[in-house]
Image (cartoon, rainbow, N blue to C red):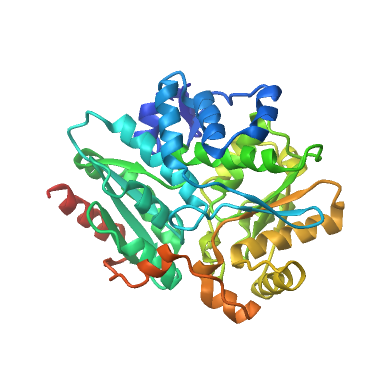
């Protein structure tokens, strides 16, 4: 399998280059030369398989021509000592709980496999690999957890000051060793911009081996395909193809779902559910993509005003807006609506949910109003409610149980370097770090 930039389909890259570079030199996004398609009997057989077994099959389809199958199986078994259970809330409504990993967020699924893949491909290098990560909430902690103490790899996490929850911040800033947190005076879009500028800076690229662990990285995107197949495998036998409802910020999660569908997974439609940062729903409604500064919401991991994976999505649909509209329904939830769905989920289903999943539940509510519920709806539950305990308690009147791992991290001391949202400051920091 070869990979190419969304900006240049004529310059192929190897898997190793695509994974370790993170971004192509032209600042596009890596795309595969083809989408591997799985036989339907194999997909049906997944009903009796665990998450690591499903992950092994899918990773072999993508990487099996360059990495031995036994090594991929080992990566998957090691990455996933947890499951992604499908929970029925009522009727045709399901929640796919993606928060049973070590940092209690769906990003663990992508980050843990990615860490093992990058460590495998980085073996034998004399110079350290420096991974730059911009996070609006959960990505940073999942990447930190996945890469902590991995030999030969340093991680630098940029997060927006005052725009993540206290629990999220502690999960970002308490690792030490090969993990460094940079607290940026700005929004997530500033953090993402700084990371992209770093990749384009010739001196930085000459002084450091840089890579990415955001969903702009193909190594993060592919493992997110795993749980779409796992979800369908848990539906009752004979179920119609599901509607996947995806709380969306940088749109890596939805892009992974589209890839799963193109691999042969039965999917009726997708719902792109956003908070007030709704540039993609706006595009689907008007045909105009207009990035803008993000606004802060309680579903902060989705506060993205210029989602990178939009360009992957359009490429996958051949830049055909009508084809995208046919497959993707869009809905936008404001703060009051998000709170209403959090209360409704508890009152009617006795299920505590946090703001991101509540945005997804609103997307499903709107889809059903317009299209009916002949197909099961699978809402992606992206984080444990305890990670947003203040909002959950204030809105639902209920206190979620705090898992031991999260209770432990909140007592640790924050370690972060404060900086302005100026590339000159990030550049200086990274150059100084390269001399250590």
Q: Position of residue 365 (x, y in %)?
A: 78, 61
All told, the count of numbered labels is 0
Q: Which image quarter: residue 194?
A: bottom left
Q: Residue at x 80, y 53 (%)?
A: 92
- Residue positioned most to the left: 436
Residue 360 visible in the shown view: yes
Q: Residue at x 22, y 28 (%)?
A: 124
Relative to 100, 117 lies left or right: left
Q: Position of residue 302 (x, y in %)?
A: 55, 60
Foreground residue, 435 or 74? Answer: 74
Q: Position of residue 84 (x, y in %)?
A: 58, 48
Foreground residue, 430 or 165? Answer: 165
Q: Residue at x 45, y 71 (%)?
A: 165
Relative to 72, 417 lies left or right: left
Relative to 308, 321 lies left or right: right
Q: Which image quarter: residue 189?
A: bottom left
Relative to 67, 204 lies left or right: left
Q: Residue at x 41, y 62 (%)?
A: 405
Foreground residue, 212 or 199? Answer: 212
Residue 27 visible in the shown view: no
- In the rendered image, the vertical position of residue 131 relative to residue 3, given as above or below: below
Q: Position of residue 361 (x, y in %)?
A: 71, 61
């Amino acid at each position: 399998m070869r990979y190419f930039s969304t900006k240049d389909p004529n310059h192929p890259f190897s898997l190793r280059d695509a994974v370790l570079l993170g971004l192509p030199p032209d600042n596009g996004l890596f795309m595969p030369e083809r989408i591997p398609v799985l036989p339907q009997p194999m997909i049906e057989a997944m009903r009796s398989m665990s998450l690591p077994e499903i992950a092994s099959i899918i990773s072999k389809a993508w990487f099996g021509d360059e990495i031995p199958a036994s090594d991929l199986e080992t990566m998957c078994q090691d990455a996933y000592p947890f499951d992604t259970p499908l929970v029925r809330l009522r009727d045709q409504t399901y929640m796919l709980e993606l928060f049973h990993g070590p940092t209690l967020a769906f990003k663990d699924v992508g980050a843990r496999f990615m860490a093992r893949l990058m460590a495998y491909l980085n073996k034998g290098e004399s110079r350290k690999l420096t991974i730059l990560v911009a996070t609006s909430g959960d990505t940073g902690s999942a990447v930190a957890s996945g890469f902590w103490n991995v030999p030969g790899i340093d991680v630098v996490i940029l997060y927006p000051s005052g725009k993540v929850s206290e629990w999220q911040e502690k999960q970002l800033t308490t690792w030490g060793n090969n993990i460094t947190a940079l607290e940026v005076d700005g929004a997530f879009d500033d953090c993402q911009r700084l990371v992209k500028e770093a990749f384009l800076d010739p001196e930085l690229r000459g002084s450091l081996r840089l890579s990415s662990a955001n969903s702009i990285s193909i190594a993060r995107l592919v493992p997110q395909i795993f749980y779409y197949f796992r979800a369908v495998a848990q539906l009752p036998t004979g179920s119609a193809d599901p509607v996947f409802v995806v709380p969306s910020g940088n749109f890596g999660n939805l892009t992974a779902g589209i890839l799963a569908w193109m691999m042969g997974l039965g999917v009726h439609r997708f719902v792109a559910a956003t908070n007030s940062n709704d540039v993609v729903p706006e595009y689907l409604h008007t045909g105009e993509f207009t990035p803008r500064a993000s606004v802060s919401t309680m579903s902060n991991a989705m506060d993205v005003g210029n989602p990178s994976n939009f360009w992957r999505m359009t490429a996958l649909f051949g830049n055909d807006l009508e084809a995208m509209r046919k497959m993707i329904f869009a809905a936008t939830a404001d703060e009051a609506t998000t709170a209403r769905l959090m209360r409704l989920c508890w009152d009617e289903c006795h299920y505590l949910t946090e703001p991101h999943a509540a945005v997804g539940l609103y997307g499903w509510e709107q889809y059903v109003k317009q299209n009916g519920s002949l197909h099961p709806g699978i809402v992606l539950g992206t984080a444990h409610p305890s990670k947003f305990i203040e909002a959950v308690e204030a809105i639902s009147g209920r206190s979620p149980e705090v898992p031991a791992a999260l209770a432990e991290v909140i007592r640790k001391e924050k370690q972060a370097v404060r900086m302005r949202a100026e590339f000159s400051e990030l550049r200086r920091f990274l150059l100084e770090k390269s001399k250590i």
